[in-house]
């Protein structure tokens, strides 16, 4: 299972709808999670609502 697959699976199984990169820290490192989330936004699976906190 690729990192991308694991990210998608985590999002689909979640009870909430807002995520931070830290929510995926156990899957991959910071940069890899960022690339995966960006790909999910490009594919229309997620919507980016903000930058930073």
Image (cartoon, grey):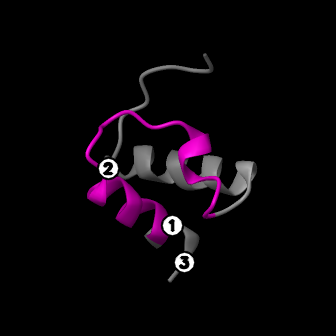
Q: Is residue 22 magenta?
A: yes
Front residue (pair 45, 8)? 8
Q: Which of the numbered marks, if any, corresponds to residue 2?
A: 3
**Is 42 displayed left or right of 35 in the figure?**
left
Element type where label 3 sits in the image:
loop
**Where residue 29 sits in the image (x, y, percent)?**
73, 56
Q: SS of the residue at dot 1?
A: helix
Read off the magenta span. Answer: 6-27
Helix, strand or loop under label 2: loop
Q: Is residue 50 left or right of residue 43?
A: right
Please give left or right for residue 24 compared with residue 11 in the image.
Answer: right
Compared to 11, does 20 lie above or below?
A: above
Q: Was residue 9 drawn as part of the magenta stretch in this picture? A: yes
Contact flag, marks 3 and 1 (Cβ < 8 Å): yes
Please tell me how crowded label 1 is: few (under 14), some (14-19), or many (20+) other residues with Cα within 10 Å: some
Disc on res. 26: none
**In the figure, 15 relative to 50: above or below?**
below
> How far from the left and from the top, in percent, is residue 9?
36, 66
Alpha-carbon span between mark 2 and mark 1: 12 Å
* Rendered position, 17 above or below 25: above
Residue displayed at 36% across by 34% down: 47
Q: Earlier in the sequence, mark 2 or mark 1?
A: 1
Q: Quadrant of residue 28?
A: bottom right
2 or 3: tag closer to the N-terminus: 3
Q: CA distance from mark 3 to mark 1?
A: 5 Å
Q: State the residue position of label 1.
A: 4
Is the C-beta separation of discs 2 and 3 under 8 Å?
no
The residue where tag 2 is placed is 45
Pick whichever, 44 or 23, lies toward us: 23
Mark 2, Cα crowd under 10 Å, few <14 / some 14-19 / many 20+, is: few
- Which residue shows up at 28% across the image and 59% down it? 13
């Amino acid at each position: 299972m690729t990192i991308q697959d694991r990210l998608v699976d985590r999002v689909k199984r979640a009870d909430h709808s807002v995520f931070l990169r830290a929510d995926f820290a156990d899957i991959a490192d910071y940069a890899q999670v960022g690339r995966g989330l960006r790909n999910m936004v490009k594919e229309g699976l997620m919507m980016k609502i903000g930058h930073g906190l």
